[in-house]
Image: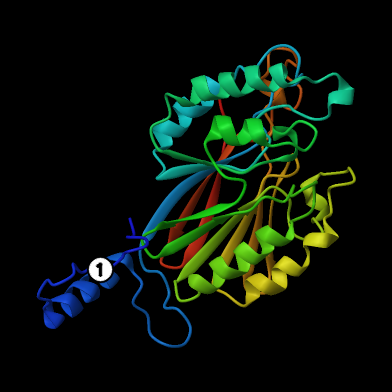
Amino acid sequence: MSIANAKKKTAKGRRFSAPLFCATLALLAAISGLCSCAGAPEAYRGRLRFALTASTFPESPFIGKNEALPALFQKLNEENPLFLVHAGDIVHGGKSWMGIAPKDLERQYRNFREASFAFRPLLFTVKGEKDVLDDNGEQYSRHMGRKFWYSFNYGPLHFIVLDTCDPVPCSMGPAQMAWLKTDLRRYRRHPAIFVFAYHPPGKSPVESGANDENADCPGLAPLHGLFLKYPVKAVFTGRGGAFFEEKKDKILYVSAGCDFAGLSSRSGARRRGANQYYIVEYRDDELTIREGKLD
């Protein structure tokens, strides 16, 4: 893993060796993958394997739970990815006028956390539309232990998690946009950047299957132009109930649309053909994605 925020400290009055200090800095830079030459970043020649899932919410916010969660985490343990990214809609939230109360989200988040305790790799999460109550994400942040937007590294690779419900669906506030631009500039010399969000920027391909008012997010369309300025290889989103890939310019857009409705105790065999997770391989600067289903 990369070394972040390395700081140099010297004690007052202590004799300082300049050659030793320079050699130490060079070693730290090499370990963290921060050394780079001018121009475009070099292609990544390593191997990375991670998993994607989404939409693990139960059919009803009031009763029951997603009975497939233990099987999902067991299956992902067998796949043995480096980490899992949940691309949104962990639980079934919404609006209080629907009758949904904080206790309903509390119960669902506890069920998800209990099931995820058996999961061995790292878990990163994206805040989706259903993960909040009245657009308040306090319960999401408290239970998942994640900020609404953040980034992390794996060696020289950089990963960005966005909140496209900031403050409402299909939007990103000025504070997040300023942070995103700073983060992209900071890692502009890295060989690859991957972005995760709930909503796809701009118009969704018709294959996505989404048919409500948030299927398209024109307010997020300028993100594509911003991403083109940096080594963004792919954008993964969780909105919608189907899988699709679309190449725009040099960036691959992937919707990891999962559907667990067919595996719940209340819906029987309805939509049993949907996928529940995806395995992403990034090797020698090439991406491949494999769909995964539960028994």
- The correct choice, above or below, for 195 with respect to 146 in the image is below
Which residue type carries mark 1? Leu
Residue 130 spot, x, y in % from top left: 74, 34
Q: Residue furthest bottom?
A: 38
User: Which residue sits at x=51%, y=57%?
Assistant: 159
Residue 11 spot, x, y in % from top left: 18, 67
Q: Nearer the viewer, residue 53 or 206?
A: 53
Q: Is residue 135 left or right of residue 291?
A: right
Q: Tell me, yes or no, if residue 293 can be seen here.
A: no
User: Which residue sits at x=82%, y=56%?
Assistant: 217
Q: Tell me, yes or no, if residue 122 can be seen here.
A: yes
Residue 103 spot, x, y in % from top left: 70, 17
User: Which residue sits at x=68%, y=45%?
Assistant: 238
Q: Is residue 209 left or right of residue 81?
A: right
User: Which residue sits at x=56%, y=29%?
Assistant: 143
Q: Nearer the viewer, residue 7 or 122?
A: 7
Identify the secondary structure beneath mark 1: helix
**Quadrant location of residue 125?**
top right
Q: Is residue 156 left or right of residue 170?
A: left
Q: Residues within 10 Å of mark 1 (few under 14, many from 20)?
A: some
Please identify the quadrant where the C terminus is shown: top right
**Quadrant location of residue 31?**
bottom left
Instruction: Determine which residue is flagged by label 1.
Output: 28
